Amino acid sequence: MQSYSTVCLRIGYVNKQDHCTIPFANSMWFSHRDCANLIQLALDVTKDPIFEICYGVSANQYRWVDIGHSRAVLGFVPQDSHEKRQ
């Protein structure tokens, strides 16, 4: 029997400008660098059978999404934050 791997990524607010342009989205902003890193980490863990659901947002001050599971399962540590980009 063949085993499959799936990592569902719940991606925060990503835009072409790579900075938050909508005030209410500050807490969900996700930088291009952090997003690419999360996707790479998710691809890396699919070498073995796995099913996970992980959130992805940058290290924003008012982030309300818990990325602890993404950190534990994928090793995701965001490098950017909305506040650092202002």
Image (tube, grey):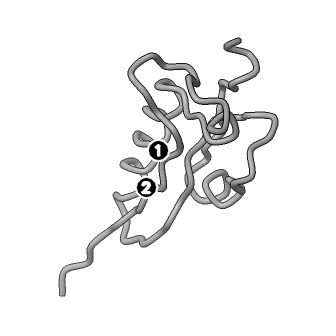
- Indicate the position of residue 37 as horizontal and vertical percent values: 48, 34
Give the amino acid at mark 2: Val
Tell me the quarter of the picture where residue 47 sits.
bottom left
Q: Nearer the viewer, residue 46 or 69?
A: 69
With respect to residue 40, does 68 lie above or below? below
Q: Quadrant of residue 1?
A: bottom left
Q: Residue at the front extreme?
A: 23
Q: Which residue is drawn at 26% across and 78% down?
A: 3
In front of the other: 10 or 51: 10
Q: Residues within 10 Å of mark 2 (few under 14, many from 20)?
A: some
Number of residues whose C-alpha sits closer than 10 Å to that of mark 1, classed few (under 14), some (14–19) or many (20 or more) = some
Please give left or right for residue 53 compared with residue 73 in the image.
Answer: left
Residue drawn at x 51%, y 39% is 13
Q: Residue 62 carries which label?
A: none
Q: Are marks 2 and 1 in contact (CB under 8 Å)?
A: yes
Left or right: residue 3 compared with residue 33: left
Percent position of residue 60, x then y? 73, 34
- Amino acid type for the residue under numbered disc 1: Leu
| Kind of element beneath mark 1 | helix
Q: Give above or below for 8 relative to 61.
A: below
Point out which mark residue 45 bears.
Answer: 2
